[in-house]
Image (cartoon, grey):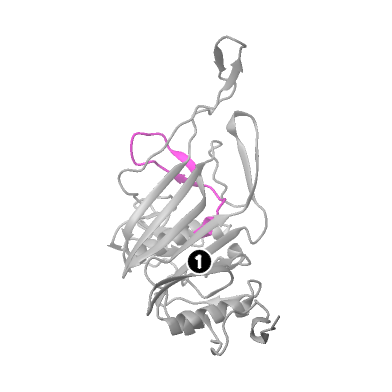
Amino acid sequence: MSVMSDLFYNRDENISGVALQSALSGIGTPSYGSSVSFNSKLFQYDTKDSYTNTLPNSLNNLEATFNLRYETNETNAQKAAVFFEDKHGDQMFPISFNDTTYNTVSGICDSYSINHVNNQHYELDASIVVDQSPNLLNWSGMNFINYTLANWATSTSYDKFDIIYSGVNTNKLNNFYYCTEDHTSSSTSADGPTGSSSKWSQEFFFEPDIGFNNSVNFKNERLEFKNSFRQRVKSNDNNATFPVDYSFKNISNKQLKAMVHFLEIKGGYRNFRHQIPSVYNRPKVFYSPSWTHTWKYFDSNDLQVSLVEDVLGIIPTDT
């Protein structure tokens, strides 16, 4: 039996003779169709009448998974594979973006795949997880969304979806307001964030696409009688609560940044007021534990947002 020495190597690395890139940017720019999913890791316990206590499980409760796609040739596909394999799935590296939507963050590549389309066309997908980023500690600049702190001012032109900081609340996280329409602020504070004619909101006022769906499952006790019928018993209040999943398609970079800023500052667990735009006419309080952003093409994005109702209906202000 002959022994081939070239078969004996550590399978940590599957390519030889290709120079290691110093940064992820060395393998090219991610293609449209790339996405990032945010998910909040929470502690939850339910009590009577559908009341739920929801808490973040750590300072790093908000986790982001960047699913980056590259349309590339064989040379760059090899560079990408060498780069990811050099990190061994346990070493962090910075991720930066050309469209200024997000800040540079550091993550770990959990997996990658290569689709061999043809001789010089390869599709490379990489899943990069950012799970060590305590976003609420960086309340002024944000960890993920690329935002520069700006204070509200009189006699200033504002566009819809602008974001300003007011400083009126003790809790700094509660001082961000979102512009609801284009306008120029007056010389007084009447149309300021807390003015009588305010054009700013802290509610989730963003309008979803038509056609969203929600399902109401009544939370009743069921008594099964042998060889007979089933009896349903209403034993709790709030038994018609339901989650809401919204889709926002082809939204601009400006609207996307305002929405992701809104969701990030809530940390995946903090409550906010929202009026469902059709059928249901009673106001509700929700939190958003997850959302997904997909880059479609230039200045066009899709955003999927999941909302969970908090039936207690309380929005903490200064805690």
Say which of 92 and 267 sits in front.
92
Looking at the rendering, in which quadrant would you find the N terminus?
Answer: bottom right
In this orientation, does residue 243 appear?
yes
Residue 154 in the image: above or below residue 6: above
Give the magenta range.
264-285
Say which of 58 and 174 sits in front.
58
Query: What residue do we see at 45% from left, 68% from top?
Result: 151
Position of 139 compared to 209: left or right? right
In this orientation, does residue 267 appear?
no
Residue 162 forms part of the magenta stretch: no
Q: For the stretch drawn in magenta, what is the main secondary structure?
A: loop
Query: What residue do we see at 54% from left, 90% from top?
Result: 19
Position of 63 compared to 245: left or right? right
Residue 49 in the image: above or below residue 170: above
Residue 90 locus on image (x, y percent): 66, 72
Query: What residue do we see at 53% from left, 47% from top?
Result: 271
Quadrant location of residue 153? bottom left
Residue 284 forms part of the magenta stretch: yes
Residue at image mark 1: 66
Q: Amino acid at mark 1?
A: Phe
